Amino acid sequence: MITGTTPSELLRSTLERDGARPFLTYYDDATGERIELSVTTFDNWVAKTAGLLRDGLQVEPGDRVVLMIPAHWQALVLAGACWAAGAFAVLDDAGDSPLVVVGPATLEPAPGSSETLALSLRPMGGRFTEPLPAGMLDYAAEVPSYPDRFVAYGPVDPAEPALEAHGVVTTYSGLVGQARERAAQLDAGPGARLLVATDDLRTALLDALLVPLVVSGSAVLVRNEIRDRREARLASERAQAAEP
């Protein structure tokens, strides 16, 4: 298995081992979208987004970043960017947070002094086609100008909170431990390719991002799955199903 005590360390090790191989394939059966990202491409998106969070939106280590977005490939990128920057990804309510990330279904400015970053979730990471409400930033318009490499100012403490979901807080090292346990539960060996059909972001982060990282594998993330397509997709993608 890939070594590391934080998600960012796992991604870096995976990149150094084989950056060109497929890492994340995303389907949305409601729109017909399919996109495939290599390890290098995924890492580039994470780096650019981490740069946007830290240098563009002044997110600091330990800050809460609320992700009000569904299980989408860009949601996995946003979580990875939070962890690269040492931030605390929160999947519950906004609370006291300097940044709230929203999608087209939750397109409202964050309360108080929080910044709001909006994702269109359009194919190929496209921009919004209509003007956003005042005070909201279009992720697709902001992120391209940031570098493809991100260097944190200091190491992330594995004991710090990394994720809050459904009222449960997990540390950076705790996420890695959960991923290793989940890989064993799924019998996902080295190089495993998992088909993860879910609209729940917490599930997607574990099964489609963290488990593939610890086993040097890959994932097929399916949103709005049409169940009748499952067997054909498993065969064409040469994947095994990740079940609850």
Image: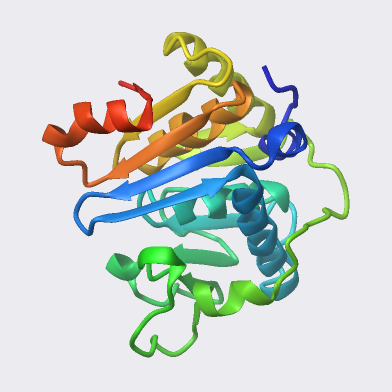
Q: Residue at x 71, y 71 (%)?
A: 146
Q: Quadrant of residue 131?
A: bottom left
**Residue 115 placed where, x, y %?**
55, 74
Q: Is residue 213 above or below residue 114?
A: above
Residue 14 visible, this orientation: no
Outermost left residue: 228
Q: Quadrant of the N terminus?
A: top right
Q: Is residue 2 above or below residue 63?
A: above
**Residue 178 placed where, x, y %?**
55, 21
Outermost right residue: 154
Q: Is residue 10 above or below residue 127?
A: above
Is 219 displayed left or right of 142 in the figure?
Answer: left
Residue 30 visible, this orientation: yes
Outermost front residue: 236
Q: Residue at x 46, y 26 (%)?
A: 193
Q: Quadrant of the C terminus?
A: top left
Q: Residue at x 55, y 27 (%)?
A: 217
**Residue 184 placed where, x, y %?**
50, 9
The count of marks equals 0
**Residue 199 placed where, x, y %?**
29, 43
The colour scheme used to paint the residues is rainbow
Q: Nearer the viewer, residue 89 or 184?
A: 184
Q: Nearer the viewer, residue 133 or 168?
A: 133
Is 222 displayed left or right of 141 in the figure?
Answer: left
Q: Is residue 235 above or below residue 61?
A: above
Q: Residue at x 82, y 53 (%)?
A: 152
